Image (cartoon, rainbow, N blue to C red):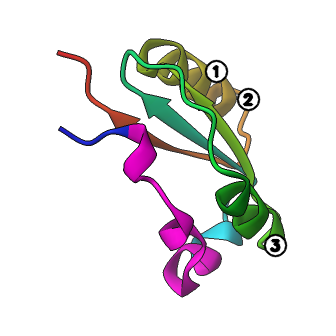
Amino acid sequence: MTKPEEIDEYLARPGVRQAANAIDTLIIGTGTEVWIPPRALRDALRTVQMVLDPMQTGPAVRTYNIMMGERRRVAAALIAVP
């Protein structure tokens, strides 16, 4: 099982930078845990003008669906909840 603390600056590497042209917000569903991303990760994503919004997976799914319904530029990375 993936844990939120395993998420790192990899998200700001070149492939993600290209994706950043298509999205403004990245929602991370952190399973059942509450997770505060490290400053380095937030800073790395800020350099590609992407907002990071971590939350538990249930609310992340709902938020993603609402934002998609509003036609906003959003992506989600979700940790499954058993």
Residue at 78% of width from left, 63% of height from top? 43
Q: Which residue is mark 3?
A: 47
Q: Does residue 50 lie above or below 64 as drawn?
A: below
Is 63 placed left or right of 25 in the picture? left
Magenta segment, prevailing SS (helix, strand or loop): helix
Residue at 50% of width from left, 61% of height from top? 8
Q: What label sits on residue 21 in the rendered view? A: none
What's the residue type where badge 1 is placed?
Ile
Magenta range is: 4-18
N-terminal-most mark, 2 or 3: 3
Give the alpha-carbon distance from disc 2 to disc 1, as whole Å.
6 Å
Q: Does residue 72 lie above or below 16 as drawn?
A: above
Q: Does residue 18 lie above or below 36 as drawn?
A: below
| Secondary element at tag 1 | helix
Asked if residue 6 lies in the magenta stretch, the reply is yes
Asked whether 43 or 50 is in front, the reply is 43
Residue 26: x, y in percent? 62, 47
Q: Quadrant of the N terminus?
A: top left
Q: Which residue is mark 2?
A: 70
Residue at 25% of width from left, 19% of height from top? 81
Q: Does residue 39 lie above or below 77 as drawn?
A: below
Residue 80: x, y in percent? 26, 28
Is 78 placed left or right of 10 in the picture? left
N-terminal-most mark, 3 or 1: 3
Residue 60: x, y in percent? 53, 23
What's the residue type where badge 2 is placed?
Glu
Is 17 placed left or right of 10 in the picture? right
Residue 54: x, y in percent? 60, 33
